[in-house]
Image (tube, helix red, strand yellow):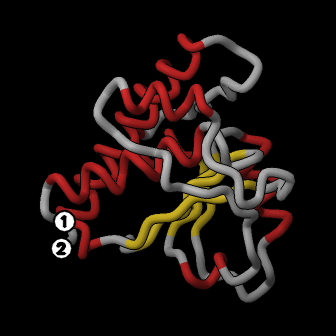
Amino acid sequence: MRSILFVCLGNICRSPTAEGLMLNHLAAAGLSHLAQVDSAGTGGWHTGDPPDPRAIAAARRRGVDLSPLRARQVRKTDFSEFDLIVGMDRQNVADLRRMAPASSTARVGLCLEEALGIANEVPDPYYEDDRAFDAVFDLCDRAVRAFIEKIHAKS
């Protein structure tokens, strides 16, 4: 695995949190050259928007800057440009599998299952309070650290 695409519904809460964490941890470890990282949403209604202010705030409290990131929708080319595409919940994974072209070379899976071997979802915090965004940050942090270990072990 050399490239990973994190996917949630609108690409403003969970997936940009994971992307920002991954980019931050790779840079801090001097490993940015080892992986291509991006995030996207299965829906496109937030295209071009920054992450949710609550996601930005949760990350900022922990020293991670999500503000430069912008939402985009999953593209057909993602299924050949990325080795691994992970959905934050089972509906994201089902949507991704439905969207995948027949020529897809990417593995599609559930984020926490691919990273940590647990079949849990990263819950959508959009309709919740700040604590939910902190909890999502923590889950994404655990997953991202596991992905980085796997990438580093194969380098």
Whether tag 2 and tag 1 are in contact, CB under 8 A, the answer is yes
**Residue tagged 1:** 31
Using the image, tell me which numbered label, if any, was put on residue 60.
none
Residue at left offset 31%, top offset 45%: 146
Question: Is 116 in front, or is 141?
Answer: 141
Residue at left offset 36%, top offset 52%: 22
Residue 46: percent from the left, percent from the top? Answer: 78, 51
**Residue tagged 2:** 155
**Looking at numbered disc 2 in the image, what kind of residue is underneath it?**
Ser
What is the crowding at mark 2: few (fewer than 14 residues within 10 Å), some, or many (at least 20)? few
Describe residue 96's horizontal placement relative to residue 141 as left or right: right
Q: Secondary structure at mark 1?
A: loop
Describe residue 78's horizontal placement relative to residue 152 as left or right: right
**Looking at numbered disc 1 in the image, what kind of residue is underneath it?**
Leu
Describe residue 58's horizontal placement relative to residue 97 as left or right: left
Q: CA distance from mark 2 to mark 1?
A: 10 Å
Query: Closer to the camera: disc 2 or disc 1?
Result: 1
Task: Tell me: residue 86, above or below residue 124.
Answer: below
Residue 71: percent from the left, percent from the top? Answer: 67, 56
